Amino acid sequence: MAPTAKRRLRIRPGFEVTAWKYMRLSAILLVPLVWFHTIFTTLVVGAENINLNLVAQRWAALGWRVYDVLLLAFAFSHGVNGLRQVLFDFAPSAVTRRALNILLLLFWLLLFVIGAVGILGGVGK
Amino acid sequence: MLHNIVNGVSGYIRYRGGIGHYAFVMHRISGLGTLTFLTMHILLESTAHYAPQLYNSLNAVLRSPAGLAAEIFMAFLVIFHGVNGYRIAYFDLFHPALWSHPSAPHSARAVWIVSFLLWLPACAIMILHGLHLI
């Protein structure tokens, strides 16, 4: 083991540290959440059997709606923050990063609201 | 702006970190792929609420052979991102010293092997479903 491995950096807490931790902690939650969702829908039910009636049936149960909203909340925030981290590698300037933060926040909010209203509203007529 | 992008991309290509480097690049590619899929998935599934007739016709497009191939490809990206994500979360949260340990490349190799082993049966079941054999 190299002696440098023992060196400890002092990291100031803040939004970026929280975002870094959030990516790891949400990952632990997302593997069971996403994998159960995809194994159930594509392997157990089968993608070819999915239709509007089945979606209506599932969303009739509160448990499934809560599950789908949790999935949307964790997966999409993890994804958009991941995109933010990738884009930051190409955008070192503070001004560009600020603009990216605002744009990505709006993108996240818009898609999250569209999805959450859809899930909670259930199948339309 | 442009030179930042050129710098970033050439760094991805030129850095010779071996299998750990490929895992890093693949984590980003699979993450971006999954986010693209997820964005379309949110919009498509929410048509069940906003425009149910549209949902049926869009769903029919996904049930084509090209749709099945795309889903099988997506499955690998999601599996790899999850398996490698667990490696990253475990190292970063519990054993950060493991990143500089000589055995770190083995963990990246293990991620590829585990991902393929999980993907192959999923692949088979998805094809059987697609051909209406199960």
Image (cartoon, coloured by chain):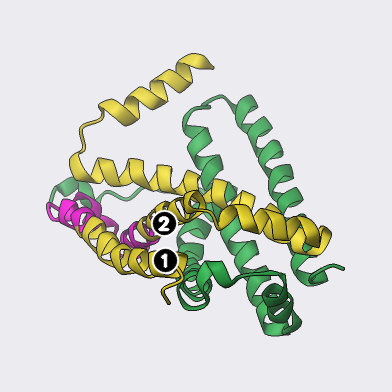
Chain to which the residue tagged by mark 2 belongs:
B
The alpha-carbon separation of the residues under discs 2 and 1 comes to: 7 Å
Q: Depth check: A56 or B117 in front?
A: A56
Vertical side of B39 occupied by A91: above or below: above
Q: Residue at label 1? A: B126
**Is residue A96 shown above or below B114?**
above
Residue B72's label in the rendered image is 2
| Residue B93 forms part of the magenta stretch | yes
Mark 1 crowd level (few <14, some 14–19, many ≥20, 10 Å Cα): many
Q: Secondary structure at mark 2?
A: helix
Q: Amino acid at mark 2?
A: Ile
Please check the rendered image and state whether residue B98 is part of the magenta-colored stretch, yes or no: yes
Residue B34 left/right relative to A123: left
Asked if residue A77 shows in the view, the reply is no
Q: Which residues are magenta?
A: B81-109
**Residue at the spot x=48%, y=38% of the render?**
A86
Q: Position of residue B24 (x, y in %)?
A: 33, 44
